[in-house]
Amino acid sequence: MTMRARNHLTKFLILLSFACAVQAAIDFKGWLNLHTKSYGSEVEHKKRLAIFNENHELVKQHNAAFEVGITSFSMTMESPFADLTADEFSTLYLMEPQQCSATTHQSSGRLRPSNNGEVGEKKIEKAVDWRSKGIMTPVKNQGHCGSCWTFSTTGCLEAHTCLAHNKDCTHWHGLAEQQLVDCAGDFNNFGCNGGLPSQAFEYIKYNGRGLDLEDTYKYVANETDGICKATAGEVGAEVAFVYNITSNDEEDLVHAIATQGPVSVAYQVSPDFRLYEHGVYDSYNVTTNTTMCSSSNTDVNHAVVAVGLGETEDDVTFYIIRNSWGTSWGMEGHFWMKRGENLCGVSDCASFPIVPKSGDRAEKKNIDGGTLRGIADKVLY
């Protein structure tokens, strides 16, 4: 037996040993009670039970690898998606792969200063968590609609609006995702089939009224009658400028999160991600011993909000990211993603809005869309 084969066999035996030792986190009956779920027929119940058991085997194998340090995140059968196949989950919750052309070229210069020092340097802390600042609204749930891009947009814009006006927004219902689903199509967005936060921010900037409140333009998790009802609600936020981070410029992304606030990001979700529990997500595939996701800027299929930065005790750096699948998924609706290698394309579609403060509203229409310099001193904090 060759050394390579011997190593593979040893790894297999270790995984098998831990797989046998890992206790089943929850059985199907317990899972149904946990999520108050039932099915319309015995046939459907049996189908879901079979899928649940298949996912359970995957979780056992993955967590065995996690226990011995091969991967840095664990999975759980308590996930609200434990009765779905990867294909079903993708159809119900992910958007179609997006081309991140909006951030391929720089439009505003880097936040992180180069030789010209356009924006002042600020020390990057090892730990940054905007949730502790009172500017994050409660985690939302997009439901059976590929509208993650709208929740990434609102989550980020809500935070910057609250930050600009120095308000505690931890109990605010926030902004209207449904307006983006219904009204932002002219900016290359496609309702429940996907879109990009950078393009949604552009819609909010140029539509003449901003974005309505959630309370007055209710989210219904589907494309309604195709009629935009934005004139009926109350405006909750405006955008003066959109800062697009150049694709794959992870240094600028980190600097933006550390010094400016939460940032909308998009990435490619792999099939295993629906069962994430905790830890630093690295997209490890236990069956192939490889990274599952792609880092191409043409394959992103989910948009979220990066709300902070962190580092583990063994020096693994990560993003703290807010999702839109409710609080029963992940770490109360959040996850950590490994940073520094553009994992899953996380820095390919990053952007955030510049929000006008009260005194800036009169100048909003006169801002040059091609440069940040004119308003940097006023709105970059």
Image (tube, grey):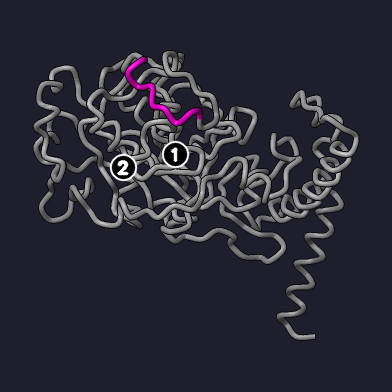
Do the residues bearing badges 1 and 2 touch, measured as CB atoms within 8 Å? no
Nearer to the camera, 114 or 290? 290
The picture quadrant where one finds residue 81 is top right
Q: Position of residue 50 (x, y in %)?
A: 85, 46
Query: Label 1 neighbourhood size at 10 Å, few (<14), some (14-19), many (20+)?
Result: many
State the SS at label 1.
helix
Magenta stretch in the rendered image:
224-232
Q: Quadrant of the N terminus?
A: bottom right
Q: Position of residue 288 (x, y in %)?
A: 68, 66
Residue at 49% across / 55% down in the picture? 344
Q: Is residue 8 left or right of residue 151?
A: right
Q: Position of residue 75 (x, y in %)?
A: 69, 45
Query: Which residue type carries mark 1?
Result: Trp
Image vertical order of residue 123 relative to residue 67, above or below: above
Query: Which residue type carries mark 2?
Result: Ile
User: Is residue 315 in sight in this rendering?
Assistant: no
Q: Is residue 223 left or right of residue 13?
A: left
Q: Which mark is residue 149?
A: 1
User: Is residue 244 in sight in this rendering?
Assistant: yes
Nearer to the camera, 194 or 124? 194
State the SS at label 2.
loop
Distance, label 1 to label 2, CA atoms, is: 27 Å
